């Protein structure tokens, strides 16, 4: 693999950050994963293996002679070779792997292994082999000390064939060993409707006028008619996983019931086209913006009454928590982090059956509650009072760190 330099930065509050410097691998236009057209870089295996090897070198004391970590915390497949490199060196440095979405696994042809410094003996079921491919994520799951996911429900779901993406057997084994658990994400403190500078007007649970101002702003921005009916928002990647097809199917009924729908996001071309057609069919009632702007998204959360989130699976999800914080009730599939953050009939609405009928049942329950201002306001206040921060998650991660360090020292 190419050689690289290690940069060291110290922030104003004393946090040390190490930066991997290798222009031939990382100095490119586009995203961390692909070019400006969205096509993956052909050498992504080398790019992320180099990242993992650098992290392993740091853990061995080779990167900075003045410091070495007690533990490594890795995220997803791009960093998943790190504990493997340590194991192949015979070193016992505890490591935590957090999986945000099991569907992204980092699969490559096994012929790439020699260039990545992966020994031939590792290409087996108890190693990096996954149905004839080299899997970065499987390597992380197999060699790391402990695995976490971003919600308790998702941690259980990925041990089943339905959600396990072919790795459910290994994950069940880790769960049985007490080495897999879920820790729910939080959201940062900027998601506060009383201080958010992006909003048309701030508001709070005891003063709803600002929320109405945001609703007016959203309607105007999306070209919707003035209305006293419910406003539904979709803020999402427009992909199959997110259940966009169900949201499109539900829009007809929502409009017929006097509601309006606003959508922002980008994704699969078929969904982008279908949403644009939907907006053309219902001018004044459906507004669609292909793309994403954070300020506009925040105003959508603040101005909407409901957030549509019929994801087929959702490891954690943040949109439902943003919506709740801004007094918009999420209507969501009972899966993953959605099941862990939404109390049905209290802070939002959940449906179990992944179908348009199941989704519509939850929407109709929402419409019924919207018709009772007292009940609806009570639910909005309950949603806004959900603890949104990271303090609970931080304490859980601290416990996992201590467990891993103790196990390594035993």
Image: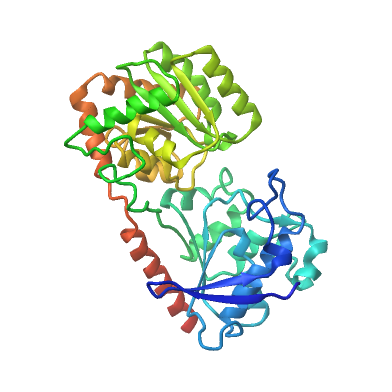
Q: Is residue 126 visible?
A: no
- In the current view of this chain or complex, which residue is farthest to the bottom? 65
Q: Position of residue 178 (x, y in %)?
A: 46, 65
Judge whether 222 appears above or below 141 on screen. Answer: above
Residue drawn at x 73%, y 70% is 122
Q: Position of residue 110 (x, y in %)?
A: 79, 61
Residue in the picture at 47% in, 49% down: 154
Q: Position of residue 71 (x, y in %)?
A: 49, 76
Question: Foreground: 164 or 342?
Answer: 342
What kind of colouring is applied to the model shown? rainbow
Q: Is residue 93 above or below residue 148?
A: below
Residue 143 seen in this snapshot: yes
Q: Where does residue 209 sit, x and y in percent of width and height?
A: 22, 30
**Count of marks, rendered view:** 0
In the image, 3 versus 368, the foreground residue is: 3
Q: Write the residue at 44% across / 20% down.
A: 223
């Amino acid at each position: 693999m190419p050689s690289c330099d290690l940069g060291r930065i110290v922030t104003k509050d004393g946090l040390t950050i190490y930066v991997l410097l290798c222009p031939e691998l990382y100095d490119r236009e586009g995203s961390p994963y692909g070019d400006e057209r969205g096509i993956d870089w052909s050498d992504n295996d080398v790019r992320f293996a180099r990242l993992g090897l650098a992290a392993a070198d740091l853990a061995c004391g080779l990167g900075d002679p003045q410091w070495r970590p007690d533990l490594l915390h890795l995220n997803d497949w791009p960093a998943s070779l790190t504990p493997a490199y340590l194991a192949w060196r015979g070193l016992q440095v505890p490591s935590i792997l957090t999986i945000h979405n099991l569907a992204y696994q980092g699969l490559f042809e096994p012929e790439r292994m020699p260039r990545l410094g992966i020994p031939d003996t590792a290409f087996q079921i108890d190693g990096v082999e996954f149905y004839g491919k080299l899997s970065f994520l499987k390597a992380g799951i197999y060699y790391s000390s402990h695995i976490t996911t971003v919600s308790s429900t998702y941690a259980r779901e990925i041990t089943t064939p339905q959600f396990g993406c072919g790795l459910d057997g290994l994950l069940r084994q880790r769960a049985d060993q007490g080495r897999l658990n879920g820790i729910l994400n939080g959201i940062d403190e900027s998601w506060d409707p009383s201080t958010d500078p992006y909003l048309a007007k701030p508001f709070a649970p005891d003063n709803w006028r600002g929320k109405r101002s945001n609703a007016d702003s959203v309607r105007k921005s999306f070209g919707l008619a003035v209305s006293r009916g419910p406003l539904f928002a979709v803020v999402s990647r427009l992909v199959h996983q997110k259940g966009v097809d169900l949201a499109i199917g539900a829009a007809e009924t929502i409009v017929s019931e006097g509601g309006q729908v606003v959508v922002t996001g980008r994704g699969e071309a078929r969904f982008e086209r279908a949403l644009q057609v939907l907006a053309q069919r219902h001018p004044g009632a459906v507004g669609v913006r292909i793309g994403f702007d954070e300020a506009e998204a925040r105003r959508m959360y603040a101005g909407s009454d409901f957030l549509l989130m019929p994801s087929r699976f959702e490891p954690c999800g943040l949109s439902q928590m943003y919506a709740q914080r801004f007094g918009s009730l999420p209507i969501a599939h009972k899966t993953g982090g959605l099941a862990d953050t939404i109390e049905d009939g209290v802070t939002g609405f959940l449906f179990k059956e992944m179908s348009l009928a199941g989704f519509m049942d939850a929407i109709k329950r929402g419409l019924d509650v919207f018709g009772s201002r007292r009940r609806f306001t009570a639910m909005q206040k309950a949603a806004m009072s959900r603890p949104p921060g990271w303090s609970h998650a931080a304490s859980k991660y601290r416990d996992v760190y201590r467990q891993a360090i103790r196990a390594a020292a035993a």
